[in-house]
Amino acid sequence: MARILVTGGMGYIGSHTVVELMQQGYDVTIVDNLSNSNVDVLEGISAIVGRRPEFENIDCNDFVNLEAVFKQYTDIVGVIHFAASKAVGESVQHPLMYYRNNLGSLITLLEVMKRYRVCNIVFSSSCTVYGQPDKAHLPVDETAPLQKALSPYGNTKQINEDIICDEAHADADLHATILRYFNPIGAHPSALIGELPNGIPNNLLPFVTQTAAGLRQELKVFGDDYDTPDGSCIRDYIYVVDLAKAHVKAVERMLSKQSEQQVEIFNLGTGRGLSVLEIVREFMDATSVNVPYRVVERREGDIEKVWANPTKANTVLGWKADTPIKDVLLSAWNWEKRLRNIQ
Ligand code: UD1
């Protein structure tokens, strides 16, 4: 069976994708420097799948060691590139670190891929590239105009998309699938892998589950005076396992040479927007656990409302994110309970 190299495969979306790939019969080599993950994730993946992925503790910016991986695993047929720093606030504080890490790792990877004639890459991008779409572009499809990034993190996603397109233009053999994720949430139903935020979570769901677990006193809802039905911001929350499955579809499409263009772009979302207050209510309904919350000032740089038009992914990839939100929220809670030893 074919081998897929997964950079950042120990991380949140990466680990769920490794599971789905292996369950479809692929062999997987993970390259990860554990900068925002830990080695126990390997145990979780192995317990779910019943076999172990190969793991190389390597930084993607390290050409020599990355090249050694391609030399060792001669059956690599494609790469999924997740490895990147992703904290928006930190990227504003340390832009050079973000540009070096996120751009350098993709460039290094593409160089090594070219040398070893591996010519399929799936790139992990974000709906952040659309900024706040105007009314005419909501829900957002892939033709919506991109907007100037609000953070160095967001800018690295845009620049990396450009790097891929430029390289594909120069190298007719290269095929790339750019996946623009909306807001991934939840955890594997086994509760053996999930999201492991560093310190105080920035993202909504980990903050909700940590508040439910008693680690945080209350959730701060950032603003209820937006132009939305209940005044809180709207996002398209997508189950991480559904998202992971889209990567397998993308890989299969490239390997079977079905892609019509060298670079294909897909929005990955559910097509449904939920507000912060709706998420909190749905979470309490699904889990019967109270989440104390308070509405506070808006968070600087927040987008008011954005959700996907996933028609292209639905039809072309033959993929749909259809896990009910209650199940998704329950999976997030089961993971948090396992982390905190809550019965
Ligand atoms: C954020 C990033 C985005 C990145 C994405 C990765 C910002 C401004 N945007 O997106 O660039 O691609 O994470 O997952 O940081 N909320 C609260 N209270 C909280 C936390 C969040 O009310 O404690 C609200 C936010 O205001 C927002 C929603 O929950 O309306 C979702 O927030 P979050 O999970 O941080 O995702 P994004 O803002 O969509």
Image (spheres, rainbow, N blue to C red):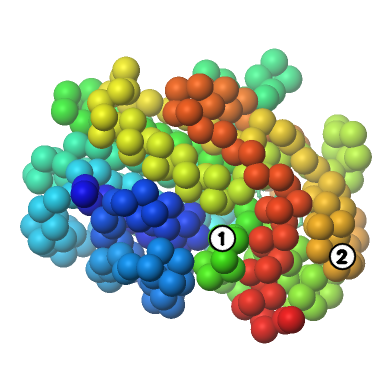
Query: Which residue is drawn at the image coordinates 86% and 32% (left, top)?
Result: 227
**Badge 1 element:** loop
Q: 86 above or below 175?
A: below
Q: What residue type is disc 2 on?
A: Ser
* Disc 2 element: loop
**Residue bearing the label numbered 1:** 188
Q: Earlier in the sequence, mark 2 or mark 1?
A: 1
Q: Is residue 289 left or right of residue 108?
A: right
Q: Residue at x 65, y 44 (%)?
A: 323
Q: Quadrant of residue 139?
A: top right
Does 40 sit above or below residue 12? below
Residue that carries the numbered disc 2 in the rendered image:
288
Q: Residue at x 32, y 69 (%)?
A: 52
Q: Which mark is residue 324?
A: none
211 on left or right of 264 = right
Expressed as whole percent of the image width and height from the top left, the position of residue 301 reads 68, 45
**What is the quadrant of the C terminus in the image?**
bottom right
Horizontally, residue 239 falls left or right of residue 106, namely right
- Label 2 beta carbon within 8 A of ligand 1: no
- Residue most toward the bottom? 341
Neighbour class for label 2 at 10 Å: few (<14), some, many (≥20)?
few
Instruction: Establish if 49 lies above or below 300.
Output: below
Label 1 neighbourhood size at 10 Å, few (<14), some (14-19), many (20+)?
many
Looking at the picture, does residue 314 appear above or below residue 24? Answer: above
